[in-house]
């Protein structure tokens, strides 16, 4: 249980700080930037899970279906932010950023499938 908590926190931290660095190196036209973030977050979350399974105790190795689920839910979250922004604005306080919403989608997909 502790290993899974550590893995979750590592996925959040590494995804949040590494994705913008990679994003800045890839030119993206228009409003498609959030979809690129969804892809980057899903890949980073999955790779952190693979590496975490090698290092941490009581953490199982994720499969390719985990990557697929993470990618699909992250892309759905990005589509919700882009095409239905009133849903994101309905959160109390309206303090969640669009990038955090997409990262939460990638994490949700990863942990649902596991």
Image: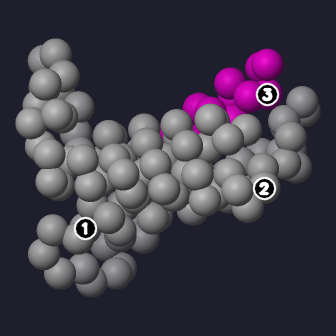
Q: Which residue is mark 1?
A: 33
Q: Secondary structure at mark 1?
A: helix
Q: Which mark is residue 63?
A: 2
Q: Nearer the viewer, residue 60 or 56?
A: 60
- Is mark 2 in CB contact (under 8 Å) with mark 1? no
Q: Which residue is mark 3?
A: 3
Tell me residue 3's x, y (percent): 79, 27
- In the image, taking residue 96 as reference, residue 86 lies left or right, namely left
How packed is label 2: few (under 14 Cα within 10 Å), some, or many (20 or more)? Answer: few
Residue 11, picture quadrant: top right
Inter-mark Cα distance, 2 to 1 = 27 Å
Q: How many marks?
A: 3
Give the mark, 2 or 1, whose residue is nearer the N terminus: 1
Give the mark, 1 or 3, whose residue is nearer the N terminus: 3
For the N terminus, give its image quadrant: top right
Give the mark, 2 or 3, whose residue is nearer the N terminus: 3
Tell me residue 7's x, y (percent): 69, 35
Identity of the residue drawn at 13% across and 25% down? 90
Is residue 29 in sight in this rendering?
yes
């Amino acid at each position: 249980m502790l290993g899974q908590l550590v893995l979750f926190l590592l996925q959040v931290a590494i995804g949040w700080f590494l994705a913008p660095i990679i994003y800045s190196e890839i030119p993206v036209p228009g409003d498609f930037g959030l979809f690129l973030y969804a892809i980057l977050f899903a890949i980073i979350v999955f790779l952190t899970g693979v590496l975490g399974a090698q290092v941490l105790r009581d953490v199982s190795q994720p499969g390719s279906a985990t990557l697929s689920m993470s990618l699909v839910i992250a892309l759905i979250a990005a589509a919700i932010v882009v095409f239905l922004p009133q849903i994101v604005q309905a959160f109390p306080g309206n303090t969640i950023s669009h990038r955090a919403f997409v990262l939460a989608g990638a994490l949700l997909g990863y942990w649902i499938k596991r």
